[in-house]
Image: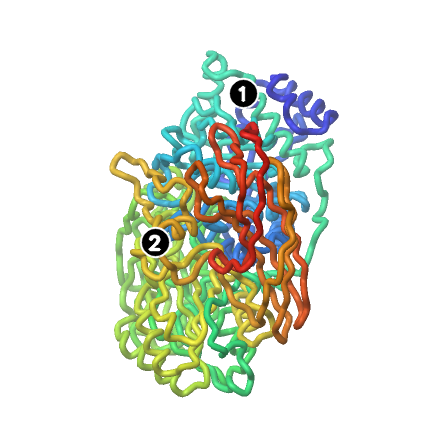
Amino acid sequence: METLITDLNTDQSTDARLKSLLAELTLEEKVRLLTGRDFWTTWPLEKIGLRRMLFSDGPTGVRGEVWDEREPSMNFPSAAAISSSWDPAIADRLGAASAVEARRKGVDVVLGPTINLHRSPLGGRHFEAFSEDPVLTAELAAAYVTGVQRNGVGATPKHYIANDSETDRFTVDVKVADRPLRELYLLAFEKAIVESKAWLVMSAYNSINGTTATENELLETPLNSEWGFDGVVISDWTAVRSVESASASQDLAMPGPDGPWGEALVVAVKSGQVAEAAIDRKVFRILQLAARVGALEGFEAVAAEPVDREDPIAFAREASAAGTVMVKNDGVLPLAPAAARTVAVIGHNARYARTQGGGSATVVPEKIVTPLDGIRDAFGADNVSYSVGAVVQEGIAELPLEQLTNPTTGTPGVRVRFLDSNGNELFAEDRRSTALVWFGGDAPISASSLVQFHTIYTPDETGPVRLGFSTVGHGRIFVDGVLAREATIEATGTDLGAAFLAPPSASVEVQATAGVPLEVRIELDTHDREGALSNALAITIGVEADDADPDSLIRDAVEAARAADVAVVVVGTNSRVESEGYDRTSLELPGLQDRLVHAVAAANPRTIVVVNSGSPVLLPWRNEVAAILIGYFGGQEFGHALTDILTGATEPGGRLPTTWPATQEDVPVINVTPAPDGTLTYDEGIHIGYRAWLKAGTEPAYEFGYGLGYTTWTLDGVDAPVTAAPGAVVPLTVTLANTGTRLGKNVVQIYAEKPGSAVDRPIRWLVASIPVWAGPGETATAILNVPTRLLAYWDNGWTYEPGDYTLRIGTSVTELPLETVLTLTDVSEEGAA
């Protein structure tokens, strides 16, 4: 035990005190601490003053212990939007704001950031991760971790490692060679560990080169032995699958109370199968985490209260604008008031915006400002028309709270009752939403036989509606006391997360009259639930979209566009397209949205398109419209941030962190589907993202690093050293000028090239970037530090190739007007760092 523990990077007195507490514990007590107590918490141990620690999903918002609209959370912009700012200061502020949210909810550890790479644009969870580039990802992830932990909350970089797609994520074996593993996938994690000192890391579901992540040697090397990680390796939920994994550098198995460790691990230690020293190291790290977050008596927390606070709503608005990328503007933006007296807002996502992606990262905000809300606020409701244009929704959408009356309380909402097999009420609660999730909390799901949802629904339109529910299991729909539909809904696929959070639906057509209440009761059988989610429940009650006459929807939108000065079309994805648990099969926008944009653009040459997706989609009409803004999943202030940009109140501050293709066939690295033997081979090696595009020689729709602003710039010069030694950090001073008439932002990017290299290299690769603001006519100086480590390649250690490297400086991976040559001095190899 001593040998394993003395290497940990802790204060010596704290180290000794933690060892003393560890020595007080029995083997059974120690093993118990290594598995969660329930979905979200660890075991307390009163005899050493250890309280429980609470974990919460939180890459871009902190949900807390319960998934409950009565305890709302801030919904910040998605990681893809944050990364589009190219601004570590924004990521740091997101981390700090997330920690403030965590402290408000009693959360000790935020399960984020998600920093897997955008290897293929089909990856279903890329909205939750930063970029296709490891250096940009590493910078932003490290900044986020620093912000979270400065405010006394643990951050958890995830998912370690090579969990870059969702298909068969529990079982896939990712085959990846050492060079790409080190130069891409591990590099994205390294800075958050080495420099920001993350307190936790989450191990992934998948295997890497034949060994599951929770048992993989990569948890020790490089994580512990090279990077000096002294924190807790927490598993992704249910990722620990064997007693043998306790011999690996996996520290905490979640969730609890059941799992593969427990009593079986006690027996394994007593039999000598697992060394007790391995158990001691894990427990020590868990106690150390508890000391850092203030969960262990007698130890001073890193921050008793948050030390860095700001208005979270104002920050959410600023961050959304900072990450919005303008990829086209023929001069229509910003909108002059005289030129936009009437605005036609078009699109399903304009009214029902996606502010976040689906899956475990979901939070429940108190209020969402949609694009339609924001545009009405900015231009006046009387000057703004709305047309849906094309239906994007798939499945059930929740019922609006203002149309619901709880039959028990008479207040807005739903009465939910959990009943036993005799019809006796075990538990009841009054909810303010019909999209409900129980994932932890007090509801006795496993003990109940039936859950009943009861509300009075008052439609606001006359005509047929398809009333239904989305869940897994057997349920019934009663309308005005009459059984209208009974159905059994089976999960699709094998992914638990997708089955739980994005299940199929059942519905029935009901005739509705505006203003006439309907009594709606949904009953769901729960007596036969089993497996990992037996004490969890998710259901959405509501209506399916009416897409019976798509041609008329487009005609109405075209007429509205023709009658307006400006048309703003909001297109995007839905929860069946981008979510945890499954990958995309197509990069096309769902439904008839492309047809809609073609038609609107033909009717009004001043058509602005806002893209409400978390990752790249195809834009076949991009040459027909006047302007395109990529707003991603912009968080709860999405609508206000959008109108700040439309009106010119702020700059569209984003640059693309991921290449956007013109066609799906052009994408050089796209496969996310494992072979029949369960393997997914990264046979592209070090060439992903823009590196692969450059190698293929194919032109995308919009390249990595690209984005426009409301002013013009010149890059005027670069001053840099001529030579550098391996391991040095090289400062480059770049001079640029804002030649326009208003304040603006640019992102200076530096790419390295090594012509004639002795090894396979990308044509060029990112080594540094910095956002720069300047006023009209102002000259700015930016200093960018280039670590020569980023010029090295991996060959059983970081290997430096001496000679000349061209450093190209510009504003995207292809717009690089400046260059300088750096000569790396002759040192053949540096040990692994």
**Which quadrant is the C terminus positioned in?**
top right
Which residue in the protein does label 2 denote?
A: 667
Find residue 665 and report its image quarter.
Answer: bottom left
Q: Earlier in the sequence, mark 2 or mark 1?
A: 1
Specify few, some or many for label 1: CA neighbours under 10 Å numbering under 14, 14-19, or 20 or more.
some
The residue lying at 63 percent from left, 44 percent from top is 730
| Disc ID at residue 278 | 1
Circles 2 and 1, Cβ within 8 Å, touching? The answer is no
> Which residue corresponds to the image point at 60% horizontal and 45% vertical from the top-left?
786
Residue in view at x 36 percent, y 35 percent:
175
| Screen quadrant of the N terminus | top right
Secondary structure beneath label 1: helix
Element marked by disc 2: loop
Residue 7, given in percent of the width and then of the height, sits at: 64, 23
Left or right of 44, for residue 12:
right
Give the spatial CA distance, label 2 vs label 1. Answer: 45 Å
Give coordinates of residue 385: x percent, y percent.
44, 82
Q: Which of 246 and 163 is in front in this view?
A: 163
Please name the amino acid that badge 2 sits on: Val
- Judge whether residue 246 can be spotted in this image: yes
Q: Position of residue 372 (x, y in %)?
A: 48, 74
